[in-house]
Structure formats: C-alpha cells, structure tokens
Amino acid sequence: MNSGPPLSRRGFLATSSAAMGVVAIDGAQASDSEKLAIEGGPKAVVAPAPKLVRWGAPEREQLDAMIGQNSLFYWKGPRTTLFLERFRKVCPLPHAMSCSSGTAALHIAVAAAGIAPGDEVITSPITDVGTVIGVLYQQAVPVFADLGSDTYNLDPADVERKITPKTRAIIAVHLAGNPCDLNALKAIADRHKLILIEDCAQAWGARYKGRPIGTVGDVACFSLQNSKQVTCGDGGVVASADAAIGPRLQPFGDKGMDRVKGGGLFELFATNYRMSEPQAAVAAAQMERVETIAEKRSRLGSILNDELADVAAVAPPAARAEDRCSYWFYMMRIRPDALRCSRTEFVKALAAEGAPVAEGYIPVPLYGNPIFQNHGFFAGRWPVKEMGLTEMDYSKVSCPEAEAILKTCFRLTIHEAMGEPYVRSLTAAVRKVARRYAV
Ligand SMILES: *Cc1c(COP(=O)(O)O)cnc(C)c1O
C-alpha cells in the first residue's frame, strides 16, 4: 500500500491525521499546527468554501415555457399547476395554495383555521417574525413557549403549561430544518382541541419519523424566500388535508374569492397573497431538487453531530436518528462554563480558521423586539388589548432557555455543494478552537 520510505511515529501521525483532516496533536510540529490562525498559525480550513449553484437548465426550461404563455395568472396556470403537483410529491396533502411568501402561507393558515380576535396561538420565540405576523393581523395573540436546550424547538411540556381557555392553535416551527417533537405536540393539540400548524419554512425535505414534514399537523406552511433550501426569490405554499381548512386556503390567499365555488360574492375577508406564473415556473423546477438537497444536508449535519459530540466546550444540536433534519443552517452552542473566552472571541477565532461561521441568530426572542414590548402593532395601538380581549403583556414574558440559546449560539453554514472532507475540516476547526480555549 505504502511504497514510500518508512515513516517515523511523528511523521506517520502528521501524515495520517492530515489525510483525515484532523489536526495533529503530537510533539513540536503538532503544536505549530495547533496555533490558532488568529494567532498566526495555519488555518484548519484550507479549501475555499464550495460555491453553491442553485438553479440551471430545469429552471430555464420552465421560464422558457412560461414566456410562451399568454397569461401569467396563477389560477389554472400551467406553471402553478406543475408546481403544486410537484409540491404534493414533497408534501402529499390534497389542498395546496401557492402564495407570495412564507409569511403569507402562515397568515392564510391562521385565517383558514378560523382563529378569531383574542384567540391565543402558542409558538416559538426563536423564529422569523413571519411566523406571527398573520396571527397578529387576524387580531389573535401570539403566546411564546420555551424551547428545548439542544433542539431549539418548542418544549411540549412548556406548551402545555401555556394553554388557557383562549388557546386555539399551536404553530410548531421546525427550526433550521429539525423536526419538532410532533407526536407530543399533536397529542397536546388533540387533548385540548387545538389546531396544529407546522411552520416548515426552514425545513424543506425534512422528515419526522419517516413522514414528510408538514403531514402530521393540520396545516403546513412553506417559504420559497431566497435564503431557504429551495426558492423562487420570494414565494410560499400552504397545504392541508383537513376537509374544513383545506378548501379555504385558496380564497384566503386570493382576496376572499373562492375560484372553485365561483359566484363572485365575498363570503370571506382576505388580502391578496397570490403567486404569479414566473415565480411558479422557478418554484416548479426547484421542487425536483428538494430531495437531493435535504439528503445531502442531512448527511453533512450528521457528520458534524458525530464529530463534535465529544467536544466539551460546545454543544451540537440534537437531531433524532429516526428523523431527517434538512439543516437550513447548522446551529450549535458554546458551553460558557467550559471556555476561557467569550462567544465573540470563539467565533472570531473560528472565522480566522476559515470556517463559514456567524455569531448568534436573531438578536432577541421575538417578544423582546420593540414592537412587542410597546404593543404598538397597529399605528402604535393594539386593538385586542384595548378591547379587553387579551391581557398579554410582552414586557413580562420570559422564556429563559430561548434567551440562553440566543446568548450562546453560533451557526455554521452547510449546504449541498460542500463535500464531506470540507465539512470534516470544519469540525477540525471547531475542535482546534475549542481545545485552545477550553478551561
Ligand atoms: C423565512 C421564514 C418565514 C417567513 O417566510 P418569508 O417567505 O420570508 O415570508 C417564516 N417562518 C420561518 C421559520 C422562516 O424561516
């Protein structure tokens, strides 16, 4: 196998560990490579970050076909029809409405579910604000429950504690593509007769115990915004198998016009959240990419989880082996007690090693934002509070675990263009920085 000259022990260690993408820890040479890049040592990640190519011939083909049409309107549009057909292969639900964003999908879901003024909707404080915009526009009240320390998803026990006679729904956010504990949330929803809405905006291609994400709850909401695993620039889709909610998704995305029933009379009040054919053309092509993207991201994320499991200074995210997390990003936490440096110093050192890393996620839990603290949603006022339909005071809300997560988390970029050796070099970088700053 090895035709070269015999290797010394140190030489063997250096070559074999370099080949494995692991930093050597033996002797003088090793201590050189142990020197952090931020202190003038060699970088742990030498390869440039692989470039992500997100669209190509399939998207061009759909756009060309779209140009040949004489209408770009969504209703019965060939691109929209194809998009929804392909979406149903990703998320097999009979009723689906394409729409302008994930925020729109969630608003449509809340409206179609009949959430009324003053009703309470329990959700996560660490999410995109789009999760709760529709709740607030329907004059309902977001109630924030705390999260699991390593899943960053709703803690079912705290969800149950937050239930009151006004609770009508739960919005389960699958953060970064990691499925929530849906069996537990579904059991709570059934026990209290609540609607379970799945916010799958970050979870394209994820699976819960083998089931496509979005198929356990009553309504599934997806985003096609530019940063998500698949995209058409901006867009979304909302879907349901529920016989009451399902048929209302289309009119609630289309100014209340029920294009199936027809008639032209407005029986529902809604805004215009339609997606047009140019977006649907790109979205239709992107649907064919979901499975390979999710499979690859899941594999890369598992490598990070496995290789970082024994690093005392950091806490990798928890993903259940029977699920598929589609890692929109890879978020982990530092363990402040196990480190002699701040998160900022840790992340700076990691970035200097060549790792694509960002400190934190959102700056504060949703309730910590000025708009919540001031209850000033509608021209500085909040009608449901003035009307006595809620006593919610966001300045008194606290979700300690969510707050701790945001103070200790950092994110590595992982995506489908990255190879396993590159991702292993990221783990080497984290291990190296962790060793340097470990207490
Ligand atoms: C992106 C996102 C949304 C909103 O989607 P948009 O298309 O940006 O409106 C909602 N929820 C989560 C969890 C998201 O990540």
Image: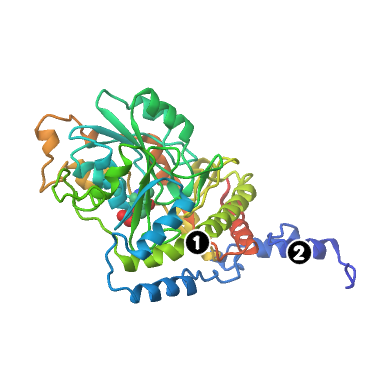
Nearest the viewer among 156 and 115 is 115
Numbered badge on residue 45: none
Mark 1 Cα-neighbour bin, 10 Å: few <14, some 14–19, many ≥20: some
Scheme of colours in the image = rainbow
Q: Which residue is mark 2?
A: 14
Mark 2 Cα-neighbour bin, 10 Å: few <14, some 14–19, many ≥20: many
Q: Is mark 2 within 8 Å of ligand 1?
A: no
Q: Residue at x 75, y 58 (%)?
A: 26
Q: Is residue 230 left or right of residue 368?
A: right
Q: Residue at x 37, y 30 (%)?
A: 159
Q: Amino acid at mark 2?
A: Ala
Q: Which residue is mark 1?
A: 288
Kind of element beneath mark 2: helix
**Residue 20: quadrant of the picture:** bottom right
Residue 177 visible from this viewpoint:
yes
**Mark nearer the viewer, 1 or 2:** 1
The quarter of the picture where the C terminus appears is top right
Q: Earlier in the sequence, mark 1 or mark 2?
A: 2
Q: Is residue 22 left or right of residue 122?
A: right
Between the C-alphas of marks 1 and 2, the distance is 43 Å
**Residue 75: quadrant of the picture:** bottom left
The answer to whether residue 167 is above or below residue 344 is: above
Q: Amino acid at mark 1?
A: Glu
Nearest the viewer among 131 and 344 is 131
